[in-house]
Image (cartoon, rainbow, N blue to C red):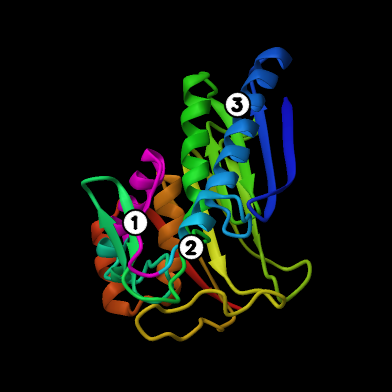
Amino acid sequence: MFHGSLRNIMGTRFDIIIIGKSKCESEAVWYKVESELKRLNRMLNRFDQASEVSKINRTIAHQSIRVSDEMWEILNSCKRYHEETFGLFDITLKDFDTIQLHEQNKSVSFSQPGIHIDFGGYGKGYALKSIKRILEDATVHQCFVDFGNSSILGMGHHPYGDAWTVSIENPFVIGQTVVEIPLYGAALSVSGNTPSYSGHIVHPKLGNPETGRKLVSVLIHDPLDAEVLSTTFLIAGESEKKQLRNSFNILSVKEYNL
């Protein structure tokens, strides 16, 4: 068994457990995973003034800036999610339509001042999806990835069981487990508020922060879908939730009132 860890990446902790590979093979995989995480952090971390997203955010309204091919694909991916979630997923937290994507030269501009891009509800899922590809390319069949206790990937099963068991803890009651979820060949994302971190999820249409004491868990094969949907379900109405369930291949979505 191999364990790799980064204590602070994308604002949180990252852990990976690899089963069934030699130490040399596992270390080679870990080197690729670590390098990819650091690369994506330099691209998507808005708190890093040298990151690509920070450079975009410093752009004055109506002034365009050319972006990398990968950032172009990411922004278009975010646009698709925005449309598929009825506007509930929004990396501007205000109005995604203020982001102008110029196809001819792959540049971006904002149609009004005061707009910023925040990949907080997207970045970890995107990173986890990229890491999944690295693991698959390295023929890793048994693996557990924990990204900040909220974005989780399970490949294969626990060496002493049929699945990887994930415990979701109540952030308001120390030591209380809300639910245990078996994870086998799928991704899990959990969104919600904590006593020290509340109101960070904003309804983009209403402008209201979600401050309720609840969690949402989404189990699905695609780590990026999981990340986007867990936040979206937290603020979605009942009609929107029903449509989301019909639109995505969701294995399970649960809400927990704390």
Q: Are marks 2 and 1 in contact (CB under 8 Å)?
A: no
State the residue in front, 194 or 124.
124
Residue at position x 53%, y 46% from top?
Answer: 43
Residue 68 falls inside the magenta stretch: yes
Residue 162 in sight from this viewpoint = yes
Secondary structure of the residue carrying numbered label 2: helix
- Which residue was labeled with disc 1? 108
Q: Which residues are magenta?
A: 61-81
Q: Residues within 10 Å of mark 2 (few under 14, many from 20)?
A: many
The quarter of the picture where the C terminus appears is bottom right
Residue type at tag 1: Val
Q: Are marks 3 and 1 in contact (CB under 8 Å)?
A: no
- Please tell me which of labels 3 and 1 falls first in the chain: 3
Name above or below for residue 170 compared with residue 102.
Answer: below
Which percent across, then down, holds residue 121? Answer: 49, 61
- Please tell me which of labels 2 and 1 falls first in the chain: 2
Q: Residues within 10 Å of mark 3 (few under 14, many from 20)?
A: few
Residue type at tag 3: Lys
- Which residue was labeled with disc 2? 57
The quarter of the picture where the N terminus appears is top right
Name above or below for residue 172 compared with residue 164.
Answer: below
Name above or below for residue 135 compared with residue 114.
Answer: above
Residue type at tag 2: Asn
Residue at position x 53%, y 19% from top?
Answer: 138
Secondary structure of the residue carrying numbered label 3: helix
- Which residue was labeled with disc 3? 32
Which corner quadrant of the image does residue 27 belong to?
top right
